[in-house]
Image (cartoon, rainbow, N blue to C red):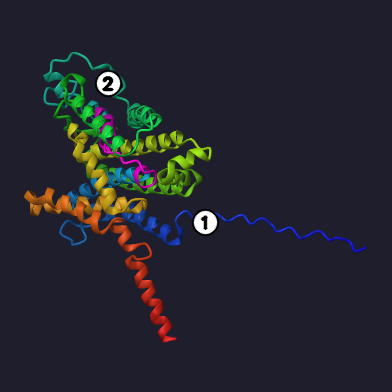
Amino acid sequence: MSAVLPSPVTPTIVPRRGLLLGIRGWAGVTTALAVVAVVVPISNLLVPADSVFHLSEYAVQLIAKIMCYAMCALAMDLIWGYTGILSLGHGVFFALGGYAMGMYLMRQIGSDGQYRMNMPDFMVFLNWKEFPWHWALSDSFVAQMLLVVLAPGLLAFVFGFFAFRSRIKGVYFSIITQAMTYAMMLLFFRNETGFGGNNGFTDFKRILGVPIQTPSMRMLLFVITGCTLIAFFLIARAIVESKFGRVLQAIRDAESRVMFTGYDPLRYKLAIWTLSAVMCGIAGALYVPQVGIINPSEMTPAASIEIAIWTAVGGRATLIGPIVGAFFVNGAKSWFTQAFPEIWLYALGAMFIAVTLFLPQGIVGLLRGPNGIVARLRRSARKEEGSAS
């Protein structure tokens, strides 16, 4: 009787986790970091103003402003491109972060204002004798930086909890986010709320005791903004490549099936929604000291719609696409408003319609994908190599 030999056990192959971005991706990130932290500071601070390689203060401020917008577009991509939640109210989170930073900057003015008193000029004008309760810690940089995160994060958490628990989705969710933004805009327009009314906050002097208008401080803010944008991109990439990100994409594609498999979509949507709001708040806090003003116009419905446009034009669910879209749209806006100011809004509308009809995957989709320009070039190169051999 022959012995029965045990069948060999096939070892379980655990797939090796690849690089977060790949070699080309990390090369791009390194290049972007070098440009932000080395090339731009040298071009602005060290290269003579009459040199063709000099980067003007206007250009630095414009790029910094667009980088703040790019953070908002990246935040929008996480919830819209990867989770399927279209928000038309992200402008309010951007503005809340800006107002939190603006309160600190107003306290830094001290007695250098028009009325030479230790209160903001608008409070002196309104004959206020003391600061409102919500200004109690506004002279503390640490406290206000915490408020930059907590104010938009808490509002997003409370709003999202009730909205997602009620299974509000699609166009109805977009409408109520727009309503929330409009309500907050009307609130901040009121003088008695202590946020400067329709004028908002402006005429900033110092940050951490250092004058804002000095070239070194403005360049430091620029570098911090650029590094923050790169960090947000890496965080977003890590999220979408993780199990958490795959669940988000499953919720986007078939939320009911996700529930039937035992996952709770509420927790996932609420987490990414709150994180997205915090990202916008930090972007607003970086925006204010560089632009020099924050007012309720940042909460208008049009401001929130523009964030969605940047994301759509660049390409949803790509992460790099919204950044490209923010630079492309705002760069075009800067040029059009100088060259053809009367037709800018028509150009923006035509751009959005053209992208929707002819480039549903945005600018990045035109380059990537099986039918993208890069893929076509590779296929043609392979054909040439095959014919040559």
Q: Residue furthest top?
A: 129
Q: Residue furthest right?
A: 1
Dividing the image into 4 quarters, which one contains the C terminus?
bottom left
Residue 55 percent location from the top left of the image? 21, 55
Numbered disc 2: secondary structure: helix
Amino acid carrying label 2: it is: Trp
Residue 300 percent location from the top left of the image? 19, 35
| Type of secondary structure dominating the magenta stretch | helix
Residue 192 percent location from the top left of the image? 18, 18
- Which is nearer the N-term, disc 1 or disc 2? 1
Is residue 125 something that shows in the picture? Answer: yes
Q: Nearer the viewer, mark 1 or mark 2?
A: 1
Is residue 219 something that shows in the picture? Answer: no
Residue 140 percent location from the top left of the image? 32, 25
Residue at left offset 51%, top offset 39%? 260
Splitting the image into 4 quarters, where does residue 84 fall?
top left
Identify the residue position indicated by label 2 in the image: 135
Identify the residue position indicated by label 1 in the image: 18
Dividing the image into 4 quarters, which one contains the N terminus?
bottom right
Residue at left offset 28%, top offset 16%? 133
Rendered view: 377 above or below 310 = below
Foreground of the two, 175 or 15: 175
Splitting the image into 4 quarters, where does residue 39 fall?
bottom left
Start-end of magenta stretch: 79-103
Q: Residues within 10 Å of mark 2 (few under 14, many from 20)?
A: some
Foreground of the two, 45 or 101: 101
Mark seen at residue 242 = none
